[in-house]
Structure formats: structure tokens, C-alpha cells
Image: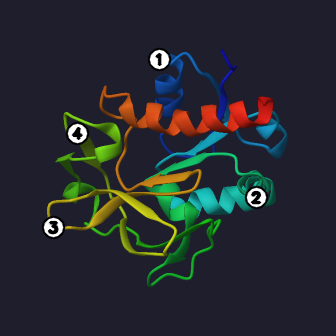
Amino acid sequence: MLMRRVGVLALQGDFAEHIAVLHRLEVEAVPVRLPSELNGVGGLIIPGGESTTIGKLMREYQLTEALNGLIAEGIPLLGTCAGMVMLASRISGMDQQSLGAMDIEVKRNAFGRQVDSFESDLDIPVLGQPPFHAVFIRAPVIESVGDGVEILARLADGSPVAARQNNLVATAFHPEIPHDLRFHKYFLSFVDRKLEAKAA
């Protein structure tokens, strides 16, 4: 069995919840605040929080270049809520820096403020049945995607809220909140595949 070691960006936001999920899945979870803490990780999660704050702290702690290096290596990344904003190549109506790794355009706070948070049961084919109970908190939405991007889930009105491009996965919702571990297991399948290819 390959040793799975996954970093969770721990600058701001709900990183502790992702770490708890990884522990439930018997994965070594590493809180990442400095570039040196990325050494040896087979995957990385960028959690929800405040994307402008996360971006500012990433620059302050010199993590941006290190994360771009991981992306160039093909290390799997999961970005949830603000993490999706950080992975996007375009943020509509905003001059905000991001990693620009995924060929998607997102709109921040697309559904309104904290009080407009909501929950929805989503059909996510890659997870199978039953539907995934998704929690949206000041959530972004995907407004457009490039040719190499697979949409994983949509709301009832057709709005895309999860996508994948190669080893990069992004969700507008918080998969760490419900007790359903399937989305993290889906992400870990990319981590396993990358580790197996490396070991071969």
C-alpha cells in the first residue's frame, strides 16, 4: 500500500475540517504554511475561506511559486470554495491574483452573502449514487470552462459547481462538511494514480 501524504493549505479558512476528513480516511495530513512543508506531499487541498486573504498570505509566505511548481509536476490539487477561486485562471469582475492553473472562469460570492448560504443534493456521476449533499457558503460559481475541463456537477438551474482538469479538481461547495467521504476519496484516487506512476 502506497503511503499517502496530503498537504492542506493552512493559512486561513476551514483547513482543520479537511485534515479531519483525511485522518478518517487514514491519510497522513500535513498542514502547510511554508514552502518547506510541501516536501514529499502527494497531493494538496486548498480549503474554503477568504480567497483574497489566502492569496495575500500565499505571497507573503512565498508559497505561490512553490504551489506553481507542484502544479507543473502534475501533483493533484483539490480547491474547495475559495480554493476553487485560487485555482481559476479567470475571476470575473475582479482584478485578483490566483494560481491560474485551471482553464475556468469563476464568479466570487455568486449566490450572495453568508445569510444566503444553502444546501443542495447533487448528482455527481463520478461518485455514483446516492446524490451528494453539498453545502454552499458564500460560494463561487463556474461561469465558463475551456476545452480540457470536465464539469463534474451542476445545480438544478444548470450552473456548474464542480470541475476537473487533469489532476486538478475544484468545487464551489464544501465537501468536508457532510459526513460523506466520497468526494475526498475521488480526489485521493488521483493522488494514488500519481504515486503509482512515480513508483513504477
* Residue at the image position 31 percent from the left and 28 percent from the top: 180
Left or right, 110 with respect to 92, comes to left
Residue 157, label in figure: 3
Cα distance between the residues tagged 2 and 4 = 32 Å
Discs 2/1, front = 2
Q: Residue furthest left?
A: 156
Residue 63, label in figure: none
Residue 72, label in figure: 2
Cα distance between the residues tagged 4 and 1 = 19 Å
Discs 2/4, front = 2
Q: Position of residue 22 (x, y in %)?
A: 52, 25
SS at circle 3: loop
* Residue at the image position 28 percent from the left and 63 percent from the top: 113
Q: Amino acid at mark 3?
A: Asp
Contact (Cβ within 8 Å) of mark 4 with mark 1:
no
Residue 24, label in figure: 1
Give the labeled residue for mark 4: 133
Q: Amino acid at mark 2?
A: Ala
SS at circle 1: helix
Cα distance between the residues tagged 2 and 1 = 29 Å
Q: Amino acid at mark 4?
A: His
Cα distance between the residues tagged 2 and 3 = 34 Å
SS at circle 4: strand
